[in-house]
Image (spheres, helix red, strand yellow):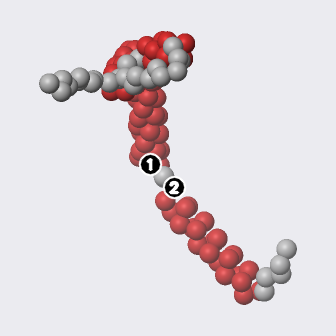
Amino acid sequence: MPQMNRDQRNAAWQAANQWRARAAQTQPTGLAGGLKLLFTWLAFGALMIVGVVFGLFFLLIGWAMMPFMRHKLKKRMEQMRAQQAQDIGGSYASHQASHHEASHNTRPGHQEVLEGHYEVKDDR
């Protein structure tokens, strides 16, 4: 522990004594001060109880809403997957089936057809 010189110890001691004197002056004296302190603690306790009740209420509401929110998000994900599959040009299963057929029909001169919208133009 570092050694403090005498002036520093005296300054800290003086500050501590000043704080103690101020605390003694602000302590409630008599019946009126005691009642004020009691009501302050009662108000603080009541606010704490009200806060805990509100917190538990909102926690229970959140827990009750979780299954509904999960269902809603699941539906939204299914819609997004369906939209993405439609944008790509079909579902994964139909893509695999067409790929499987194309791999079995590999004859010389046979061309593999890509999925999409095509038009055959007549050159006549």
Give the spatial CA distance, label 2 vs label 1.
8 Å
Residue 94 location, quadrant: top left
Amino acid under label 1? Answer: Gly
Q: Residue 97 got which mark?
A: none
Residue 8 location, quadrant: bottom right
Tag 2 and tag 1, C-beta contact below 8 Å: yes
- Name the residue located 77 percent from the left edge and 86 percent from the top edge: 6
- Name the residue located 53 percent from the left edge and 17 percent from the top edge: 107
Return the residue at label 1: 33
Q: In this view, does 15 lie to the left or right of 89?
A: right
Q: Give the camera-side residue of 122 and 23.
A: 122
Residue placed furthest toward the left: 124
Return the residue at label 2: 27
Amino acid under label 2? Answer: Gln
Question: Is label 2 in a helix, a strand or a loop?
Answer: loop
In percent of width and height, residue 4 lies at 79, 82
Q: Give the camera-side residue of 4 and 105.
A: 105
Number of dots carrying numbers: 2
Q: Give the camera-side residue of 113 and 121.
A: 121
In percent of width and height, residue 72 lies at 36, 18
- Name the residue located 23 percent from the left edge and 24 percent from the top edge: 119
Callout 2 crowding tier (Cα within 10 Å): few <14, some 14–19, many ≥20: few
- Name the residue located 44 percent from the left edge and 23 percent from the top edge: 111
Is residue 91 positioned above or below 37 on the image? above
Q: In this view, does 80 lie to the left or right of 44?
A: left
Q: Is residue 7 left or right of residue 108?
A: right
Quadrant that contains the C terminus = top left
In percent of width and height, residue 58 lies at 40, 25
